[in-house]
Image: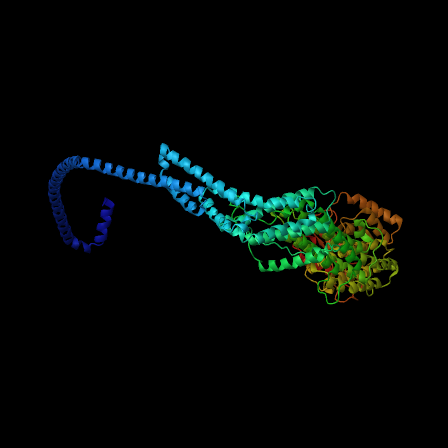
């Protein structure tokens, strides 16, 4: 302890004077503790001294033990070396005797095998000379095995002599076998009863010889068999396209008649399979020559029949030999294309036959193509499908042209027979001609895919595109012509579109039909890309066709808007004929508003039931974008408008807007009603703002015009002054002031918010103004300006009895800033 700690300890132990009586006992206790600690230290020192001495003795003993162990190890190693030397001396003579025994045994075995080889070669030579093929085949196997034992002795003269002799014998056997097989098929097999057995034994010899011998024999046999075929079908009489069926009948008859005779060949040789491969290659070469030498386009019926017979033959070979497990849709109704040919019934029979076969084999997978596989084995990768028929591909242009002609004639017939109405009970609301068009296209696709799935199918797809584009043109041409109004002016159409209720239904049917064609065209492209050759699948595209039908849909919907727009012409004219300048009081909505309502209520329900939601919404947007601006411009066409007339017109405007807002519910399609309502309110608010400007006092009309119609032009403002009935002198002073202030004032952006009336007969209060830019200067920059403006808008309230500030108040409550918000917070 340091000094301060000791003092603290003493003060803690003896805090008072009375506690000093315990000093003596404490001192005795401390002295006793000191004595115990000293004794413990002394005992530890003594024990440590004894431990050090014992550790030195143990280390010395361990070192001595290690030295003794190393000495014993050296002695053992020396004795082991002596023992090894002794064993080598003992076994030296035994090893020499063992090598001598091994060499003698090898020599005896080699001499014995050499004797056997010499004897076997001599016997084989005798068998070859006597054409004893069965015995020679077995002897060949034995000689081959014996020769394999002497591979290491190839340089020994005797071995070389025997191998050369054996090689000559094999050559003799080969020549004998080829000579005997040359008589096969000449009729000798019926005269000499043992010839077939002899040839069967000869096959055993061929199997014992090199594989190349068998290949040469089979190739020679197939070439000899096809010699007569080449001679027959290269003649002028049969070297024709319409004789293709006879070619396949010849090989099938040959296979059938020689089936028993050809059983002499081992099944592993696959003679019939290889013969068919050579036949197909030869036939393809001859057909290519025939097609290339045609002086004019081939007859479509003859060409397709030859192709169909070829596909039939290839399918039979594929099923017989299993070279390709793929199954193609070869169901064919060529008779629809070739109605004028006499063979249409035969082709129909073929189609029915193979449709049944396809149904039985449906679901089989595709087989991998591998050029490294052994094509001499059936099922190893050779594909009979297309080996001959592919040569027709470059010459199928006439077929595609015939298909296009047939499809176009059918299209014209369907359009002529189209009633442009929907059959009773139909739930699709599409024209029957569209369904029929895709039906004949699918039939054409089925016919072509049964014949080829390569470039011809791709060319036919282009034909389908032209057919569908032509159908889109037919739909486009059926739409009513002409147009007027803003939308019509934007599209450059002349004249007016007058549509009846039937015309409107037909337009809806055309929209639905174009939508159906757009969707089905995409599905057609997907189906073609699945069945066409993989190298062409990426080029399959029907987007241009779909764009055509999309254009038809857009044009039809705009035409529908134009038709309704034309119906509004009389009502718009009636609006301008109303004496707005001499009206004495505000009453119910005008007659032209009721007429507009009648037009919409008679047309919209039918349109809503026929159009899909997305196109009905598009139609509504176009209608609102047409009627709103047209109503706005129609106000300028009116003559002088008094304050009472402006109030009546404001009531009519609100009624028209209400009618437009109810259109989605009339059509029973309210999915996009919210966005449509905002759109209508925005368009009609411009007309309301214009009428509010007309209602404003003369001294504030310029400021009100800037506030409510910030995008207005001086010409429009001048026309407003004329509508208010101002004289030319009064107009000029206001216009001068307007032009002076117009260039230097930043106008606030103000939008009109309408107030929906409880009843149609109540006068409409002016819509409220929401000032979007509270920092604007010059027009409404202070509380006094706002009060003056509101008072000006409110003039005439005493005569009408309505509080015009109600709308202003309600609109201002929704704002967090701006002069109006400050006004009502004051």
The location of residue 677, given as percent across then percent down, is: 71, 59
Which residue is more in the foreground, 86 or 595?
A: 86
- What residue is drawn where x is 79% and y is 65%? 602
Give left or right: position of 348 versus 596.
left
The location of residue 576, given as percent across then percent down, is: 86, 57
Query: Does residue 822 show up?
Result: no
Which residue is more in the foreground, 354 or 613?
A: 354
Give left or right: position of 328 versus 41.
right
The location of residue 821, given as percent across then percent down, is: 68, 55
Q: How many discs mark residues in the rendered view?
A: 0
**Furthest residue in direction front, as rendered:** 191
The location of residue 665, given as percent across then percent down, is: 72, 64
State which quarter of the image contains the N terminus.
top left
Query: Does residue 51 show up?
Result: yes
What colouring method underlies this structural image? rainbow
Which residue is more in the foreground, 286 or 125?
A: 125
State which quarter of the image contains the C terminus.
bottom right
Asked where in the image residue 766 lies, by quadrant, the reply is: bottom right
- What residue is drawn where x is 70% and y is 60%? 612
């Amino acid at each position: 302890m340091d000094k301060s700690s000791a003092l603290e300890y003493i003060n803690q132990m003896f805090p008072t004077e009375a506690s000093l009586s315990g000093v003596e006992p404490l001192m005795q206790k401390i002295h006793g503790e000191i004595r115990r600690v000293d004794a413990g230290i002394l005992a530890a020192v003594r024990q440590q001294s004894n431990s050090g001495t014992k550790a030195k003795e143990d280390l010395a003993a361990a070192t001595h033990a290690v030295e003794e162990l190393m000495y014993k190890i050296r002695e053992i190693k020396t004795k082991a070396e002596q023992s090894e030397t002794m064993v080598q001396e003992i076994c030296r003579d035994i090893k020499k005797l063992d090598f001598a025994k091994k060499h003698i045994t090898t020599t005896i075995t080699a001499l014995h095998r050499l004797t056997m080889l010499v004897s076997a070669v001599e016997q084989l030579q005798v068998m070859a000379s006597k054409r004893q093929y069965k015995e020679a085949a077995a002897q060949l196997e034995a000689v081959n095995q014996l020769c394999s034992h002497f591979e290491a002795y190839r340089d020994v003269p005797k071995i070389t002599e025997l191998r050369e002799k054996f090689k000559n014998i094999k050559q003799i056997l080969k020549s004998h076998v080829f000579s005997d097989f040359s008589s096969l098929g000449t009729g000798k097999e019926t005269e000499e009863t043992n010839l077939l057995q002899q040839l069967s034994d000869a096959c055993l010899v061929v199997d014992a010889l090199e594989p190349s011998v068998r290949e040469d024999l089979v190739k020679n046999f197939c070439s000899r068999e096809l010699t007569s075929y080449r001679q027959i079908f290269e003649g002028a009489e049969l070297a024709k396209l319409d004789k293709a069926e006879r070619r396949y009948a010849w090989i099938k008859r040959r296979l059938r008649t020689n089936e028993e005779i050809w059983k002499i060949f081992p099944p592993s040789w696959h003679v019939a399979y290889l013969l068919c491969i050579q036949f197909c290659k030869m036939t393809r070469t001859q057909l290519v020559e025939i097609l290339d030498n045609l002086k004019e386009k081939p007859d479509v019926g003859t060409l397709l029949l030859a192709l169909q017979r070829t596909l039939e033959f290839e399918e039979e070979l594929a099923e017989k030999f299993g070279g390709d497990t793929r199954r193609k849709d070869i169901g064919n109704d060529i008779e629809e294309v070739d109605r004028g040919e006499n063979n249409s019934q035969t082709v129909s029979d073929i189609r029915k036959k193979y449709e049944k076969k396809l149904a039985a084999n449906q679901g089989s997978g595709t087989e991998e193509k591998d050029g490294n596989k052994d094509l001499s084995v059936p099922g190893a990768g050779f594909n009979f499908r297309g080996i001959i028929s592919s040569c027709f591909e470059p010459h199928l242009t006439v077929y595609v042209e015939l298909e296009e002609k047939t499809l176009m004639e059918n299209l014209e017939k369907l359009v002529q027979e189209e009633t442009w109405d929907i059959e009773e009970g139909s739930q699709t609301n599409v024209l029957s001609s569209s369904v029929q068009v895709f039906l004949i296209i699918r039939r054409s696709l089925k016919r072509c895919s049964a014949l080829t799935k390569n470039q011809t199918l791709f060319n036919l797809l282009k034909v389908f595109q032209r057919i569908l584009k032509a159908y889109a043109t037919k739909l486009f041409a059926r739409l009513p012509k002409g147009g007027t109004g803003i939308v019509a002016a934007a599209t450059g159409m002349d004249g007016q579109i007058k549509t009846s209720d039937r015309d409107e239904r037909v337009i809806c049917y055309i929209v639905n039909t174009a939508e159906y064609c757009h969707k089905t065209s995409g599905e057609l492209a997907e189906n073609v890309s699945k069945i066409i050759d993989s190298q062409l699948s990426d080029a399959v595209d029907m987007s241009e066709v779909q764009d055509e039908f999309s254009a038809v849909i857009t044009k039809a919907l705009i035409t529908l808007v134009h038709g309704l727009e034309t119906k509004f012409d009389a009502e718009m004219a009636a609006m301008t004929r109303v004496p707005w300048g001499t009206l004495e009081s505000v009453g119910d909505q005008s007659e032209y508003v009721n007429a507009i309502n009648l037009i919409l209520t008679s047309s919209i329900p039918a349109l809503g039931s026929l159009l899909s939601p997305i196109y009905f919404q598009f139609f509504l947007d176009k209608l609102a974008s047409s009627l709103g601006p047209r109503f706005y411009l129609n106000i300028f066409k009116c003559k002088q408008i008094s304050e009472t007339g402006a109030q009546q017109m404001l009531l009519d405007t609100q009624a028209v807007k209400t009618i437009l807002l109810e259109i989605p519910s009339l059509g029973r399609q309210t999915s996009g009603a919210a966005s449509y309502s905002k759109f209508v309110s925005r368009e009609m608010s411009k007309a309301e703002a214009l009428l509010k400007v007309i209602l404003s006092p003369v001294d504030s009309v310029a400021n009100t015009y800037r506030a409510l119609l910030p995008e207005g032009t001086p010409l429009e403002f001048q026309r407003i002054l004329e509508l208010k009935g101002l004289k030319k002198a009064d107009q000029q002073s206001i216009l001068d002031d307007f032009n002076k202030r117009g260039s230097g004032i930043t106008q606030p952006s103000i939008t009109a918010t309408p107030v929906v009336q409880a009843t149609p007969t109540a006068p409409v209060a002016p819509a409220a103004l929401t000032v979007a830019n509270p920092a604007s200067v010059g027009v409404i920059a202070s509380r006094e300006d706002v009060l003056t403006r509101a008072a000006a808008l409110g003039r005439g309230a005493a005569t009408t009895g309505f509080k015009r500030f109600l709308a202003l108040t309600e609109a201002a409550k929704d704002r967090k800033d701006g002069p109006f918000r400050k006004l009502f917070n004051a």
